[in-house]
Amino acid sequence: MKRIVWNLISLLTSLTLIYSCRNCPPGKNIGQAKLSISTTNFIPYLQNETVVLKFKSADGQFIFLQSEKGKVIENFDMVVDTPCSNELIDATYNSMTVENQEIYFKNDSIKILLVAHFRIRVPLINQIDTNWVESVYCIIGNSYNNLNDKSFTLISNNRGKEANQFDIESYLFNDTLTLLNKNFYNVYSDKLGHDIFYNKSIGIIGFRYNSKIYMLENEK
């Protein structure tokens, strides 16, 4: 019994000492941030309505992809800076409520996710509004955890800051791209230009599936 009491006293003492070492103020929400038009224009789809895309291959095969909800707009709290840090014991994390837009297409075999969001560059100490940018991300695959998934990432708005080594972008840009004898302009794709093709004003214009290229035929 004495040992249990002593252990309890020791634990309480340790917790008291740890708490007494805290010298950082509590974190707070420092405001809201909306995505800029230069970013939201990357998702040219209807909001809260079913969207169906029809794609066709060179041999006449069709693939339909559906988004049941259309474009979804949500808000999230995101840590944007760490104004105070005391190693592992104590830290202050300030957040902002930020906008996120995305649309999710799928059928039984293919999934495509397109996201416009805020992205952290790298944690910084004692600085605010210097470590986050607006980014567009697109991934295609049969599972988002599958290493065969292909994607591209780009910085859509650097928020007035100079680009740095942490602004890692991964995409290929084509002024003109021909898919199944049709020309498209200002096309983004994955780094190798093999698997997904995207235009800012149209949206997803094509992709590769089972070694075939499927091109957007129409939207209904």
Image (cartoon, grey):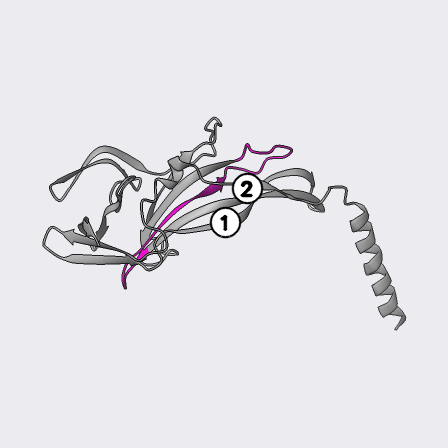
> Residue 142: where, in percent of width, then height?
31, 58
Q: Is residue 9 left or right of residue 75?
A: right
- Mark 2, Cα crowd under 10 Å, few <14 / some 14-19 / many 20+, is some
Nearer to me, 97 or 57: 97
Residue 148 visible in the displayed image: no
- Mark 1, Cα crowd under 10 Å, few <14 / some 14-19 / many 20+, is some
Q: Is residue 26 above or below residue 36?
A: below
Q: Amino acid at mark 1?
A: Asn
Q: Which mark is residue 124?
A: none
| Residue at the extreme right | 2
- Name the residue tied to disc 1: 75
- Name the residue tied to disc 2: 32
Q: Residue at x 79, y 55 (%)?
A: 15
Q: Which residues are magenta?
A: 105-131
What whole-number distance in Å separates the C-alpha atoms at marks 1 and 2? 9 Å
The first of marks 1 and 2 along the sequence is 2
Q: Amino acid at mark 2?
A: Gln
